[in-house]
Amino acid sequence: MRRLGRWVVAAVVLLLGRGQRPRELPPPEPVVGGAAPAPKAELLVIGLLILSAAFAVAFVVVYAGGADTQLLGLALGLCFALLAVASVVTAFRLAPPEEAEEPYPEPSHPTEIAEVEQIVVESGRHLTRGKLLGLAAGGAGTALGLALLAPVASLGPVFDTSRLRREPWRRGVRLVDAEGRVLRAEDIELDTLHTAFPEGADPENLASPIVVVRLEPVRLDLPPDRSNWAPAGILAYSKICTHAGCAVSLYRAPHYEPTRPRPALVCPCHYSTFDPATGGTVIFGPAGRPLPQLPLAVGPEGELIALGGFSGAVGPSWSGVRE
Amino acid sequence: MIRRATRFLDERAGAAPFLRKALRYVFPDHWSFLLGEIALYSFIVLVLTGIYLTLFFEPSLKDTVYHGSYEPLQGQRMSEAYKSVVDISFQVKAGLLIRQTHHWAADVFVVAIVLHLLRVFFTGAFRKPRDLVYYVGLAMLMLALLEGFLGYSLVDDLLSGMGLAIAYSVVMSVPIVGAGLAVLVWGGAYPGIPAFEGRMYIAHVFLLPIAIAVLLSIHLLLIVARHHTQFPGPKRTERRVVGLPMVPGYVPRTLGLAFGVATVLVLLGGLVQINPIWQWGPYSVANGTNGAQPDWYLGWLIGALRLTPGFDVTIGDYTLIPNPFWGGALFPMLVFAFLLAWPTIERRRMGDRDVHNLLDHPRDAPWRTAVGAAVFSFVAIVFLAGAMDRVAVSIGVPYTWQIWIFRLALFVAPPLVFVVTRRVCSELKEREWTDVEPMQTARE
C-alpha cells in the first residue's frame, strides 16, 4: 500500500514537471576578488605594448642596417623596459588587489609513512637470506659503477707525475726570443727583463719560457755551486711562477734604494717576488719555493747557451716536488 | 574557448585539478623574495644567449692567423677559439651584444644567487621543511661558480689563460693526489692537450647547464611542495599562508620582474663594455699582465691566494702541501662546509626540530645573525683583498702595507662583527618588546 502511494506521488511530480525547464543553478561564488574598472590604465598598458612593439621593430631595422651594438642594445633594452612597465602597471592597476590565503600543506602523513614501511617490509618477508642478498646486490652495483668509471683514466696519464719534470733545456741549447732570433750576451740590458725560449722547442711547454736579466756582477750573491751560472752578470730563471703558474712578467727595476734595495722579478697574479741576485729566492708573496735557475754560458760567437737543466722543478708545486 | 582548452588537457593529462590549484597558488609578498627570481630570469637569459653563441664559437686550440676586421690583431697567431670570439665581437651582426649580455648575465646571476642565499640564511628560511631546498641551492651556487669560470676560460685570451694556470696550480696543490688529478684532467702537464678545450666546452654548454637546470627544477618543485615562507603578520601563521594568488595578481608582477631583468642585462650588454678580449690578446704560457682581475665572483679566491703567507708545508725535503691549497681549495671548501653544516649546527644547538613556515627577522635570532655576519665579514674581507693591487694603483696605499692591514682585519673584524651584531639584535628585540608590552597590558 505504501509502495503504491509512492508510485502515485512520483507520477504526479513527473506529470506536473513535464515541459518545464530545470531551474537555473545560481552563478558560482566568485573566486577572484573584484576591482573597479580602470579604463585609463588599460589604455596606458595598450599604449606601452604598442610602443614596445615599435622598439622590437626598431631592433630589426637596426640589425638589418649597420647593426651598431649600442643601438641594438638600446632598441631591445627599451622594448623589454616597456614590457616591464606594462606588466607592472597591469599588476598594480588592473589586477584586483587580492589577499588570498590557504593552509600550508600537511607537515607529515603518518599513515602513508607507516604503509610505505609496511609494503617494503612485507615485500621481503619471505626471504631467508635477505641481508646476504642485499650485500651481494650492493657489491655488484659498486663493482659495475667502478668498472664504468675506469675509462675515465683515458683522459690523461694516470698519476704519471714524471712528465711534470720534463724540460727542453740541455747543455748547449741556444736561447732565442719570441720570434726565434738567437739571443746574444750584448742584447741583454740592465734594468729590463727579456723573455727567451729554447731554440727549436715548443714555446707552450711550461718549462720553455725563461726570463733573462743582467745585474752588475758585484750585486750577485749566488749559492757557491752556481758561481759560474751567470756569465757577465746575466741570469736566467724559469718564467713560470712556482706559486700558481702565471708568467713572471714584471721586473722591479730601476728600483728605489731606500725602500726597494734590489731589483726583483714579480709575478702579476699574486705578487710573489723573487730575487734574481741570490738564485731566485722568494722575498715577498705567497710562493713557497724559489724560481728554478737555468745555468748560462756565452758561446764562441757571443750567443747565450744553457749549461744544463733547471736547478729545480718548473711551475706550480705539488706533493713531492722537492723530494 | 578556455573551457574547451582546459577540457582537452584534463581529459588527456588529468590536468584540471592541478591547474585549478596552480592558478591560485599563494605568493607571500616581500621584496627580498624576488632575489631568487632574479637569478632564475638571469639563468634564462644565459641559456638563450649561450645557445646563440655556440652557433659561432669554435672550441679548438688549433693555431691560426688572424685576418679579420680588427686591425691591431692583423696577422697575429692565435687559436681558433680566440679568433672565433673576436669574430663574434666584430664580424657577427649583433654578436657583441649577445656576447656581452651573456657575460653580464653571468655576473648578475651569481650576484642574485649570493644575495638570495644571504636572505635565506638571515631569515632562517633554511629550516625544516626547507633544508633540502637550501642544500640544492648551495649545490647550484657551486656549479654556477664553476660554470662561470669555464665560460671565460674557453675564450683562450690572455686573462682566461692566466685563470686556467691558477686553477691548474690549485688542483696540483691538493696534497698527495693533486698532481695526478691535474695531469689527468688536463691530459698532461699544463697547458694540457688540445682536447682539454673540448672538455671545458662540453662541460660549459652541456653538462653544467643541464645539472643546474635539473637542480633548479628540483629547487622549485620542493618549494611548491612545501609552499613559500612568509614573515609573521596578521593572519600569517605557521598553518596558513597569506599573499597574492598566481592569477591574476602574481603573474603580471613576476613578468614585470622578468622583463626588468632582461632590460638591465640587454642595456648593459649593449652599452657597457665587458671583457674586451681583443685588448688582452691571445694567451701564451710565457705571457702575463699586471692588473688582471677575474670576474667578481672569483675575487674571494684570488684574495685568499694573495693573503696566504708564503710557505709550502714540507717534511724535511719533501713537499707535502703546496701554498695555493690554503687559499684556492681549503678556504672555499670551508666556507661551503660552513653553509652546508649550518642547518644541522643550529638545529642541534637550539634543539629545534619543528616545522617553520614563518621567517625570523634577523634580530629575532641574534646568535644566528651574529655568526652569519661574522663569517660573511671574513669572506668579504678576503674578497676585498683580491682588489689590493687595484687599490694600490688608484689610491696609492702600498700593496705590502695593505696585505698586513687585511691580515689584521681578518682576525679583528669577524669577532668584532659578532659582538656588535649580537648586541644590536638583542637591543632591537628588547625595544620591540617594550613597545609591545604596554599595549598588551592595556588590553588586559
Image (cartoon, coloured by chain):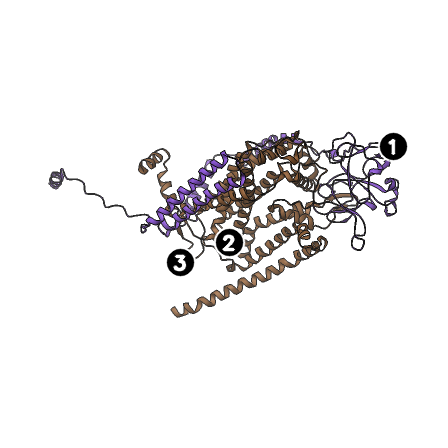
| Quarter where residue A46 is shown | top left
Q: Which residue is mark 2?
A: B124
Tell me if A119 is positioned left or right of A259 in this view: left
The residues tagged by marks 2 and 1 sit, at their Cα atoms, a distance apart of: 76 Å
Can the viewer see residue B381 in this picture? yes
Name which residue type carries label 3.
Pro
| Quarter where residue B401 is shown | bottom right
To the question of a shared chain for discs 2 and 1, the answer is no
Residue sitting at 57 percent across and 49 percent down? B339
Asked if disc 2 and disc 3 are in contact, CB closer than 8 Å, the reply is no
Q: Which residue is mark 1?
A: A301
Residue B77, percent from left and from top: 68, 32
Chain label for disc 2: B
Badge 1 element: loop
Which circle, 1 or 3, is nearer the viewer?
A: 1
Structural crowding at the residue carrying mark 1, measured as other residues with C-alpha within 10 Å and reported as few (<14), some (14–19) or many (≥20): few
**Which of disc 3 and disc 2 is earlier in sequence?**
2
Badge 2 element: loop
Chain label for disc 1: A
Q: Which residue is mark 3?
A: B234
Structural crowding at the residue carrying mark 2, measured as other residues with C-alpha within 10 Å and reported as few (<14), some (14–19) or many (≥20): many
B89 relative to B34, above or below: above
Residue sitting at 55 percent across and 33 percent down? B92
Residue A255, percent from left and from top: 79, 50
Mark carried by residue A83:
none
Chain label for disc 3: B
Name which residue type carries label 2.
Gly
